[in-house]
Amino acid sequence: MSLEKLQEKVGTQKHLLDFWNELNETERDQLSEQVLSMDFSACHAAFVSSAQPPLPIKELRPIPDERHVIKAHLSKDEVENYWNKGLNAIAKGQVAAVVLAGGQASRLGSDQPKGTLPLGLHISPQDSLLGLQAAKIAKLELLAREAYPDCNGKIQWLVMTSKSTDEPTRKHLEKVVPEAGLLLEQVTIFSQDNIPAFDMSGNFLLADKHTITTSPNGNGGLFSAISKYLPGLDKRGVKYVHVYCVDNVLARVADPIFTGIAVEKGADVLTKTVERKPGELVGSVCLNDGVPRIVEYSELGAELESQKAPNGRLLFCAGSIANHLFTLDFLKGFCTPSFHLPYHRALKKISYVDANGVVVKPTAPNGIKLEQFVFDVFDLSKNFYIFEVKNEQEFAPLKNAESAGVDCLSTCRRSLANETRRWLKESGFVLPKGLVTYIKADETYAGEVFLILFPKICKDPKIKPSRWASFEEAYRPTNRDREETALKCLNREKRPNCKNEQ
Ligand code: UTP
């Protein structure tokens, strides 16, 4: 490609070719290829339109009570009913899980994708978040098979990466998937698109003399990227698609209760929320002019942000945790390779090559990245529900480096230890104060095996209570008998024919 042709293509962004004469042949090829692959006018239009808030705020109202399912308010029977419905859908192969793993983890500052980092827990394949999730998927499939022995449904696991996370994530999953006992054919890895980053005036930036700076187009890039896999999912009989973030150590991947609610209510979109507390900087799920959406803390405004409902909770109490369930039919209704959502602007520190060819690393935000958000499709829903769970039971994201002291590795580990403790306490264990325990990820999905198995064992008078003081000590002598007791308990839930269930 001649320089003239490239100059024509870049239009007003001529500075991208400033160092052409200094590039070797390979570098010129790389830059030409990147320039040719980009739609400059579409990128410019995205930059201009992102200056306005994507969805103007009109009249905000909370999600009505009849569409707000609160787990803590459900009876044991209701929870069990939802769980069984979700497990049945898994047994029939109707459930897929999509993990959003294309983010750049800039706050964490890691050069490896978040999902692949060692957690230091050693309870899952490769000791990583992705390993934890793979083990939970395998465990759920087992529970579904035990409950519905005539079905052998698999959970399809789709992993969305981006240009920078794709290769290391693939390499990592090559080990994780077989170690977790999943089949390679149930795992699909695909990459979202990148979009150029801009300076404050809308000019493209150079990362080095032959590379235009780009970044992943936001987790809402999911919908175009996944579009070509939807027919395959349809063919396999998938009906429910759980979409979650890679960085939540407490993520209940393909949660049967979540799915069960979608099955029972006929919801096309369902999102998990946690109770928002005053001043918390989380997005709130609400209705804008009658249409579901998430508004940022700042968009709510001081008055609505702190307004109380008659029950004493915040009126806008539905805090988003980026954990959604879509029906496949809903996704099929709009996902195409060219689909895109409105872009949001994020001010970032972006390294760039200055006019002298020197790479500058800014200390304050100097540029703009454009991002689409998964939740911006909520307004397409025809039957929208929220499912409120407890923050401490289901949400502990890895966002920051240790120095931040919040949402970092140590807080993730602590949250998982606390949740494990809760499971064990509910099973009748008396654990010494301060004892930190974890359970191997493939032993339990969310404490359910222990709730069934251990209350029985703990009551055995031949076993001294002190032996139960430490979970690790108690669990190490696991033998066939105990496993069989657990299976017998589980099998009480067995359904004769999964195909007959709704
Ligand atoms: P975050 O917004 O927390 O971004 O993503 P991040 O990349 O993990 O971290 P920062 O903001 O750079 O520090 C929430 C989820 O969405 C995914 C992330 O991988 C994470 O699971 N994500 C984000 C994508 O899959 N693609 C994107 O373009 C952005």
Image: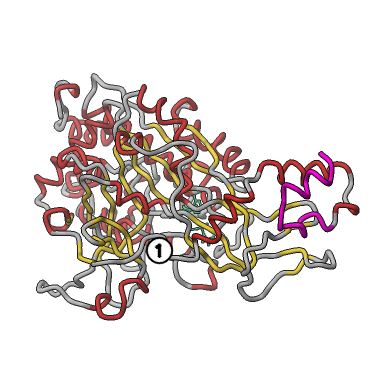
Which quadrant of the figure contains the C terminus? top left
Q: Is residue 152 left or right of residue 109?
A: left
Residue 66 screen position, x and y as percent: 11, 54
Tell me residue 130's x, y (percent): 48, 45
Q: Main secondary structure of the magenta part?
A: helix
User: Crowding near pointer 1: few (<14 within 10 Å), some, many (20+)?
Assistant: some
Secondary structure at numbered mark 1: helix
Is 319 one of the magenta-colored residues?
A: no
Q: Magenta includes 17?
A: yes
Q: Position of residue 393 (x, y in %)?
A: 29, 58
Location of the N terminus by quadrant is top right
Q: Residue furthest bottom?
A: 302
Circle 1 is placed at which residue position?
414
Q: Is residue 27 visible?
A: no
Expressed as whole percent of the image width and height from the top left, the position of residue 146 reads: 25, 28
* Amino acid beneath label 1: Arg
Residue at left offset 28%, top offset 61%: 285
Displayed quadrant of residue 487: top left
Count of marks overlaid on the render: 1
Question: From this viewpoint, is residue 194 visible?
Answer: yes
| Residue at 64% over, 55% down | 111
Instruction: Name the foreground residue: 215 vs 135.
Output: 215
Q: Is residue 70 above or below residue 302?
A: above
Magenta segment boundaries in residue numbering? 1-18
Residue at figure coordinates x 50%, y 53% from the top left: 218
In-front residue for pair 263/9: 9
Whether the residue under disc 1 has CB within 8 Å of ligand 1: no
Does residue 289 appear left or right of residue 236 in this picture?
Answer: left
In this view of the protein, which residue sits in the foreground, 195 or 265?
195
Is residue 127 found left or right of 418 in the rendered image? right
